[in-house]
Amino acid sequence: MVKRDAFSDFHPLVGLVYFMAVIGFAMFILHPVMLMISFFCACIYVLLLRGVRVLLRGVALLLPMMLVTAAMNPLFNHRGITILAHLPNGNPVTLEALLYGLAVAGMLATVIAWFVAVNTVMTGDKIVFLFGRFWPALSLLLSMSLCFVPRMVRQGRVITVAQKGLGRKPNALKVISILMTWALETSIETANSMAARGYGLRGRTAFHLYTFRRRDALALGWILAMALVALTGIAAGAIRYRFFPSVQFHAITNASMIVFISYLALCAMPTILRVKEALDWKRINSAM
């Protein structure tokens, strides 16, 4: 169940810039502190958006993936000077490769967590609003991609329940076959519907309720300012680190603290807005 969210009420451009920023940092900055900030902020936001059950189910899926990724990297990556053991074929297992594998696993988990939030906040109508006028085919593809996986999961549950209702034992192959047939039929119906409505034709307009207001400008300014401060600090070497040939992380300085704080302010922005809105409602209700 998706709960009401203050950040989701902003203009779609604000959400697009925000998620591009946090996902971009998570993908390219493998510093442990930065990854932990991003991962925990993403998890808290998913918790507020989707509830405890979705978060726990996601963590249960992410943990094995992280362990496998961390364990597989030393088997194929033999760079590093700190040898922990040797494989049967003689290749070394190094500490540097193991730590790099953990960092990559953390990066994957963080990006996936943020994409859960993206799938909730950036709805199909927002994607179409942002890209429909310039790239109608791309906007339709993105919109369908974001909506399709949750719809397939829900439809899979419906098919399973229906099979049980018919007195049949649900078979994975049978369920997948029915689900694929449903997906193809749905895609054809969607394509025909969009074509009948003139989607992608020159001069076609679309109804929307999105207006870029002052609060949207302030939120966008905050996002860009925090991202710029963090990016400037990283470019200046405030959080220098390396994994190869030996693991090395520079000591935390005032400059690196500024980077961490600005990045925390960026990643925690939706959560802060959510908490502020809840406190405001509580104050209003108590005053009535």
Image (tube, helix red, strand yellow):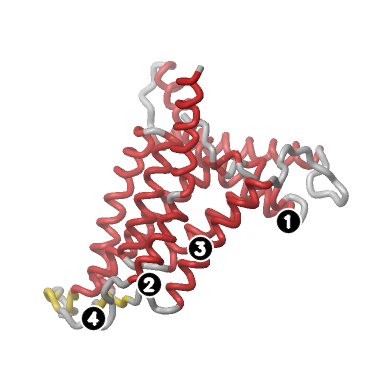
Q: Earlier in the sequence, mark 2 or mark 4?
A: 4
Q: In the displayed structure, would residue 22 be above or below residue 122?
A: below
* Camera-side mark, 4 or 1: 4
Residue holding disc 1: 135
Q: Secondary structure at mark 1?
A: loop
Image-quadrant location for residue 183: top right
In this view, the residue farthest toward the right is 203
In this view, the residue farthest toward the front is 287
Image spot of residue 3 (x, y percent): 49, 31
Instruction: Check residue 227 in the rendering and tell me which mark sits there, or answer none.
Output: 3
Image spot of residue 67 (x, y percent): 25, 56
Image spot of residue 104 (x, y percent): 34, 64
Q: In the displayed structure, would residue 53 be above or below residue 246?
A: above
Distance of label 1 from label 2 (alpha carbons) = 41 Å
Residue holding disc 2: 255
* Residue type, label 2: Ala
* Camera-side mark, 3 or 1: 3
Image-quadrant location for residue 181: top right
* Residue type, label 3: Ala
Q: Earlier in the sequence, mark 3 or mark 1?
A: 1
* Camera-side mark, 2 or 3: 2
* Residue type, label 1: Trp
Instruction: Check residue 246 in the rendering and tell me which mark sits there, or answer none.
Output: 4
- For label 4, the crowd category at 10 Å Cα-Cα, with few meaning under 14, some 14 to 19 and many 20 or more, is some
Distance of label 2 from label 4 (alpha carbons) = 24 Å
Q: Secondary structure at mark 3?
A: helix
* Camera-side mark, 1 or 2: 2
* Residue type, label 4: Ser
Q: Earlier in the sequence, mark 4 or mark 1?
A: 1
- Residue placed at 79% from the left, 44% from the top? 199
